Image (cartoon, rainbow, N blue to C red):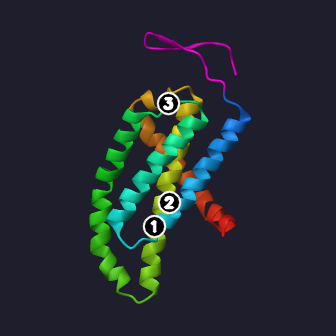
Amino acid sequence: MSERKKTTESKVVKPPVVSQKMIDDGNEIIKKYTLIGAGVGVIPSPMVNSVGVAVLEIAMIDDLARNYKFGFPTKLALVKAFISLVGSIGPVYLALKSRSAVSSVPLVGQMLSASIYSITGAISVYAVGKIFQQHFESGGLTLSKDNSFLRKIFKEKSKEGKEIIPEMVAQAT
């Protein structure tokens, strides 16, 4: 790491000391919660899935904060949870409307419905974990940027999650 100091507004922030062990442990924390997030998707209720994923994300953020020797970012985590729950209202509504059509196909429809919730929950947990990991590794600077930057990172990490989660799940079983 560079000894150079980064300046944010009027504060001077020293770059954090991040060890390879912290990074490896952070990746394991994200993997653990991603797999649990995939399991939450099996619960046959879109609203319970949304709340379950938000709770998992907050617990994961807490574990990541401890791993990187940060205090729990209460304000950021609460905003994140609120956004997750409010953002899930549209998908939950659509899921409830389409679920009856998909689930009406015996066995196949129910399995398809559960797998969709499972994958989307896991992707969300993974992306949020990677964003907070980057935030902690930057010394707490990433999430202080504007929303368009955060949306861009979330999209990137979601795409990355879509690619690696199937392999992650396969290795866990």
At 69% from the left and 18% from the top, the residue drawn is 2
Q: Is residue 137 left or right of residue 107?
A: right
Give 70 or 83, whichever is nearer the viewer.
70
Question: Any magenta on residue 4?
Answer: yes
Single out the mark in the foreground, 1 or 3: 3
What residue range appears in magenta?
1-17
- Residue located at (51% from left, 48% from top): 127
Name the image quarter holding residue 107: bottom left
Q: Is residue 158 magenta?
A: no
Mark 1–mark 3 Cα distance, whole angstroms, equals: 30 Å
Residue 98 image point, x, y percent: 31, 75
Amino acid type for the residue under numbered disc 1 = Gly
Query: Which residue is more in the foreground, 67 or 27?
Result: 67
Quarter holding residue 19? top right
**Are circles 1 and 2 on residues that touch, CB within 8 Å?**
yes
Mark 1 = which residue?
41
| Residue receiving disc 2 | 37
Kindly identify which numbered label has been placed on residue 71.
3
